[in-house]
């Protein structure tokens, strides 16, 4: 499996964020996105996820499901945690499982993966910032997707929680998954490359 981007152009607010961006990420590999704010890291992840379509260029997943968009085969964890505050921790995961047609068999394992089991009955509104981030990240263990798109995934996490996330990421890569992550810290993955965007709106491609 390989994620391939060719000649992507991203425009935002009437300006070009990046142009002519081409890269590939193979199965079992992580690509870390670095660069200052406004350089295009989030825009790239959202383009791959299909949330903010690129102005030009192509995104494809060789070896993925035919007839299914890359976005539908990817997890996107952005700055917002995308949780429902009125639902409990367990109910949030049930909602996501139902939304994706995944069933509920992996809910307990997903909670355990991010140390949420004791918080299962509590409304998400009562959680701390770090606990909310852990709940958002638990979706990675809940529903299998070959591509993970992570935008500053460690924000709000303590050292133990970062370690849990690292364990999830290693397992995903060991199983042939693909990760693109915008992060300022070294997550210590064995097969990792870095793509540096350089300065905002000036550096176009690899």
Image (cartoon, rainbow, N blue to C red):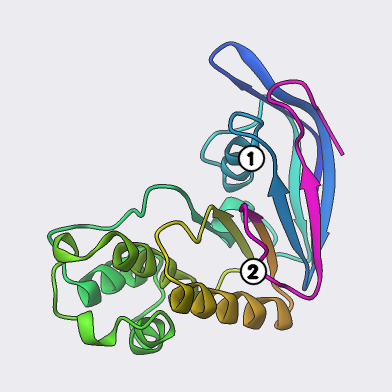
Badge 1 element: helix
Q: Position of residue 31 (x, y in %)?
A: 75, 57
For residue 185: magenta?
A: yes
Badge 2 element: loop
Mark drawn on residue 146: 2
Q: Residue at x 56, y 41 (%)?
A: 46
Q: Quadrant of residue 129?
A: bottom left
Q: Position of residue 85 (x, y in %)?
A: 17, 58
Q: Dominant secondary structure of the magenta stretch?
A: loop
Q: Which of the pair 4/67 is nearer the observer? A: 4
Q: Quadrant of the N terminus?
A: bottom right
Above or below: residue 97 compared with residue 60: below
State left or right for residue 187 relative to residue 61: left
What separation in Å lies between label 2 and label 1 (alpha carbons)? 20 Å
Residue under numbered circle 1? 41
Span shown in magenta:
181-206
């Amino acid at each position: 499996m390989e994620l391939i981007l060719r000649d992507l152009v991203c425009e935002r607010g009437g300006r070009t964020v990046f142009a002519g961006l081409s890269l590939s990420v193979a199965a079992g590999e992580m690509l870390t996105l670095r660069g200052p704010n406004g350089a295009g890291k989030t825009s790239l992840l959202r383009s791959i996820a299909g949330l903010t379509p690129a102005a030009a260029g192509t995104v494809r997943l060789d070896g993925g499901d035919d007839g299914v968009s890359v976005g539908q085969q990817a997890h996107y964890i952005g700055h917002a945690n995308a949780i429902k505050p009125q639902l409990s921790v367990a109910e949030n995961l049930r909602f996501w499982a139902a939304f994706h047609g995944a069933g509920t068999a992996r809910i307990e394992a997903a909670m355990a993966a991010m140390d949420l089991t004791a918080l299962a009955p509590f409304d998400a509104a009562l959680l701390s910032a770090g606990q909310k981030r852990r709940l958002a990240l638990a979706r990675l263990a809940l529903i299998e997707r070959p591509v993970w798109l992570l935008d500053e995934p460690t924000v709000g996490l303590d050292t133990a929680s970062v370690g849990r996330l690292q364990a999830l990421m290693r397992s995903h890569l060991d199983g042939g998954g693909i990760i693109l992550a915008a992060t300022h810290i070294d997550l210590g993955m064995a097969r990792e490359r870095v793509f540096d965007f350089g300065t905002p709106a000036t550096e176009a491609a690899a």
